[in-house]
Image (cartoon, grey):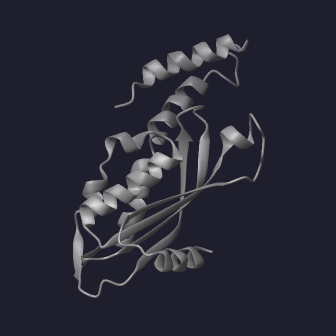
Amino acid sequence: MVDKNRIEKAVAEILLAIGEDPNREGLKDTPERVARMYEELTAGYHDNASEHLSRTFGESRGELVLEKDIAFSSMCEHHLMPFFGKVHVAYIPNGKVVGLSKLARVVEVYCRRLQLQERMNAEIADAIWQELSPKGVFVVVEAEHTCMTARGIKKVGSKTVTMAVRGDFSEELKNQVLALIK
């Protein structure tokens, strides 16, 4: 569980360190708001992808399932700044499928943690691979990182794309999925 009191004290200290007065009208409730924000943004530490993927439905056909454009926001563990974008999840069932909303819930589990995009991408693919035992999983994450757009190099609009593949996903099938994502 998040220690909101400790976060509030730390935020007040940061405000003092940058030369602000944490007691001025516009800032007096900021430490409490930031503590609530961190509680929300890190809720994934207290959630488990396995629970979301545990209820399945029999499906013998084994044809591609693609859920695309799952919007997410996360926080970069290097700068504690947001990154956001879309996740696309494709898998080839091996006798069972999961409700579509469960794929979005798996994304939420991993994006609600301090993250690296590459790790988040792999964690989503691994969870689906381990829990559903599909023939193959292909996860693509496209994201804009504010640590790159709002500070540092300041390249607004640049996106990072990562892919994770597990199991049997031929180049032809990957290309088909990438075409469907566009």
Q: Position of residue 117 (x, y in %)?
A: 52, 48
In the rendered view, does 175 fall on the left or right side of 102?
right
In the rendered view, does 46 fall on the left or right side of 9?
left
Quarter of the figure with the N terminus? top left
Residue furthest bottom as drawn? 61
Towards the viewer: 1 or 29: 1
Residue sitting at 23 percent across and 67 percent down?
55
Q: Position of residue 68 (x, y in %)?
A: 51, 71
Answer with the quarter of the image where residue 149 lies. top right
Q: Is residue 11 above or below residue 157?
A: above
Residue sitting at 38 percent across and 72 percent down?
100
Q: Position of residue 167 (x, y in %)?
A: 34, 67
Answer with the quarter of the image where residue 86 lies. bottom right
Q: Is residue 144 above or below residue 6?
A: below
Towards the viewer: 146 or 61: 61
Asked whether the viewer can see residue 3, the reply is: yes
Residue sitting at 72 percent across and 52 percent down?
158
Asked whether the viewer can see residue 22, the reply is: no
Answer with the quarter of the image where residue 98 lies. bottom left
Residue sitting at 44 percent across and 36 percent down?
39
In the rendered view, does 151 fall on the left or right side of 128?
right
Q: Number of labelled discs?
A: 0
Q: Position of residue 181 (x, y in %)?
A: 57, 74
In the rendered view, does 90 fall on the left or right side of 48?
right
Quarter of the figure with the C terminus? bottom right
